[in-house]
């Protein structure tokens, strides 16, 4: 527990810091207008759905590098071979993300047309397209930051990423407020300014983390960008085998929430704004179990690579317990304080704000119910990634999110007349199904250490 917490809390705070970039955009645009918040929500949901492919390959760096470091700790595994393997793995993760970015950027460039095709209001689609065209240029530096953060997690040195991400909050907040509202003699750019601010913040965070790693004597010796122009085809193929199922899992999860946002558009701007508030809050609490899951990936991968399956199983179960405990507390907070939280997101001068805040408070109550399931599935998936077990979890996610969550949500929302609340009840049921399936998968593997080792080696 202590070892997992020591690694997890900086990772969780880093996730919270990165989420604060999107949260800042939501708060600033919510005070600009309910329409701007609704448009940014539609654009951001499309952005996150499209970025699943490059981000999944970036996340593959953590288990790959953790197992390489663990293999170097085996008897006879000393020497600099594991250093070379970690350098090759990090470079290949960067290359894989770069390859996957090309179609992602192309899709984001036509965000307005995509949203119009899904039946969104033309005004909201146009604003969302403007936002995404500015936001998309931060995708490359963001993926680079995620790869470097995975390297630091594998080295059990997560602090540099935390300090850089924390600094990024302040930079983004200043840029976002200045560019959206203007001042000191220039006019505000509105929703366009929020996208520009986030892209610049991501770029500065990547450059800052590269600088800190290069200046650190222990970390700089890896020379992660050395001969970057020479792709390692064998290692690149390994990253893709591991990362593409992670991308698929993320796409299934992000896609179901993006589809829910699009369905919210059928109920009008108030429903989309309320969905945005509830989703931002739920996503913020999710950052902590996500960080615990990342710690589980690193620690399980380290022990699996070192040939210590029982230690890997203990590390995974410790992480699951921590994630479940935290999210149980968050469930209580959202159920009891949802109304006050919702009112803090929306400006009082907007005539639609009161209606949106009331609906958001109801959605936050539903979000509180699925907090525990969301935390458990995130940590269990992270532990499975530490074993390089990514294909089966992808299938389990597909079954839970799209076989249970979305159909139930649509039936409740449209056929039974529950509207936005019905959609969120469906999302809650889907998350519950995924949590049970992921936990069962981890239980089977961790209960049979020889099988656990075989999965890790495969």
Image: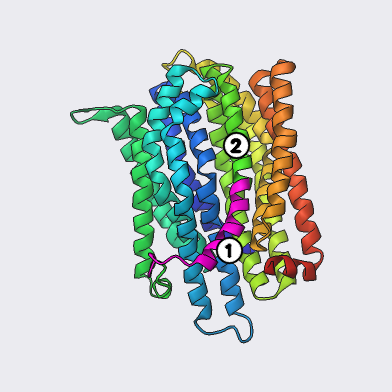
What color scheme is it?
rainbow
Front in this rendered view, residue 439 or 243:
243
In percent of the image, x 68 and y 64: which residue is there? 315
Q: Give the image location of residue 153, x and y in percent.
A: 53, 63
Residue 446 on image: x %, y %: 77, 63
Find numbered disc 1 in the image and state the secondary structure of the residue it sits on: helix
Q: Nearer the viewer, mark 1 or mark 2?
A: 1
Residue at 53% of width from left, 18% of height from top?
A: 270
Residue 241 is covered by the magenta coloring: yes
Residue 205 vs 449, above or below: the answer is: above
Number of numbered markers: 2
Front residue of 54/380: it is 54
Residue 65 falls within the magenta-colored stretch: no
Inspect this view and state whether residue 145 appears. Answer: yes
Tell me which secondary structure the magenta stretch mostly adopts: helix
Residue occupying image coordinates x 51% and y 34%? 46
Q: Residue furthest bottom?
A: 76
* 307 sits left or right of 355 in the view: right
- The reply to whether residue 431 is in sight is no
Crowding at label 1, few (<14), some or many (≥20) Cα neighbours within 10 Å? some
Please provide percent x and percent y for residue 80. 49, 82
Q: Position of residue 108 (x, y in %)?
A: 44, 36
CB under 8 Å between callouts 1 and 2? Answer: no
Badge 2 density bin: few <14, some 14–19, many ≥20, Cα 10 Å? many
**Lower position in the chain sequence, tag 1 or tag 2:** 1
* Residue depicted at x 73% and y 17%: 415
Residue at which label 2 appears: 255
Which region is colored magenta?
Answer: 225-248
For the C terminus, give its image quadrant: bottom right
Q: Which residue is mark 1?
A: 238
């Amino acid at each position: 527990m202590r070892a997992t917490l020591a690694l997890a809390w900086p990772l969780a705070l880093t996730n919270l810091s990165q989420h604060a970039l999107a949260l800042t955009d939501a708060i600033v645009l919510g005070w600009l207008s309910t329409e701007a918040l609704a448009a940014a929500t539609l654009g951001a949901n499309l952005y996150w759905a499209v970025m699943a492919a490059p981000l999944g390959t970036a996340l593959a760096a953590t288990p790959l590098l953790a197992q390489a470091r663990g293999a170097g700790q085996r008897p006879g595994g000393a020497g600099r071979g594991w250093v070379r393997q970690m350098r090759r793995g990090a470079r290949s993760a960067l290359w894989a993300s770069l390859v996957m970015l090309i179609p992602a950027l192309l899709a984001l460039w036509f965000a307005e047309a995509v949203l119009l095709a899904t039946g969104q209001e033309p005004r909201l689609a146009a604003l969302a397209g403007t936002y995404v065209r500015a936001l998309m240029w931060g995708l490359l530096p963001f993926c680079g930051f995620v790869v470097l953060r995975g390297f630091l997690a594998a080295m059990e040195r997560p602090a540099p990423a935390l300090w850089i991400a924390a600094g990024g909050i302040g930079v983004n907040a200043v840029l976002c407020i200045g560019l959206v509202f203007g001042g000191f003699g220039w006019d505000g750019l509105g929703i366009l300014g929020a996208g520009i601010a986030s892209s610049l913040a991501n770029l500065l965070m990547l450059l800052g983390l590269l600088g800190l790693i290069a200046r650190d004597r222990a970390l700089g010796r890896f020379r992660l960008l050395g001969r970057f122009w020479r792709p390692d085809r064998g290692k690149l193929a390994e990253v893709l085998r591991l990362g593409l199922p992670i991308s698929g899992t993320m796409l299934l999860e992000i896609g179901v929430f993006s589809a829910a946002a699009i369905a919210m558009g059928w109920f009008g701007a108030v429903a989309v704004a309320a969905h945005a508030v509830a989703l931002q809050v739920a996503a913020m609490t999710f950052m902590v179990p996500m960080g615990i899951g990342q710690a589980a990936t690193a620690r399980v991968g380290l022990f699996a690579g070192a040939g210590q399956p029982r230690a890997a199983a203990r590390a995974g179960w410790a992480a699951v317990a921590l994630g479940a405990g935290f999210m149980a507390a968050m469930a209580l907070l959202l159920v009891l304080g949802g109304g006050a939280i919702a009112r803090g997101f929306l400006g009082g001068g907007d005539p639609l704000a009161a209606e949106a805040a009331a609906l958001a408070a109801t959605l936050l109550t539903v979000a509180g119910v699925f907090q525990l399931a969301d935390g458990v599935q995130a940590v269990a998936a992270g532990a499975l990634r530490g074993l390089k077990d990514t294909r089966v979890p992808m299938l389990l996610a597909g079954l839970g999110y799209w076989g249970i969550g979305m159909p139930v949500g649509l039936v409740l929302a449209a056929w039974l007349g529950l509207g936005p609340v019905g959609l969120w009840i469906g999302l809650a049921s889907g998350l519950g199904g995924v949590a049970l399936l992921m936990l069962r998968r981890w239980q089977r593997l961790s209960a049979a250490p020889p099988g656990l080792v075989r999965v890790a080696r495969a």
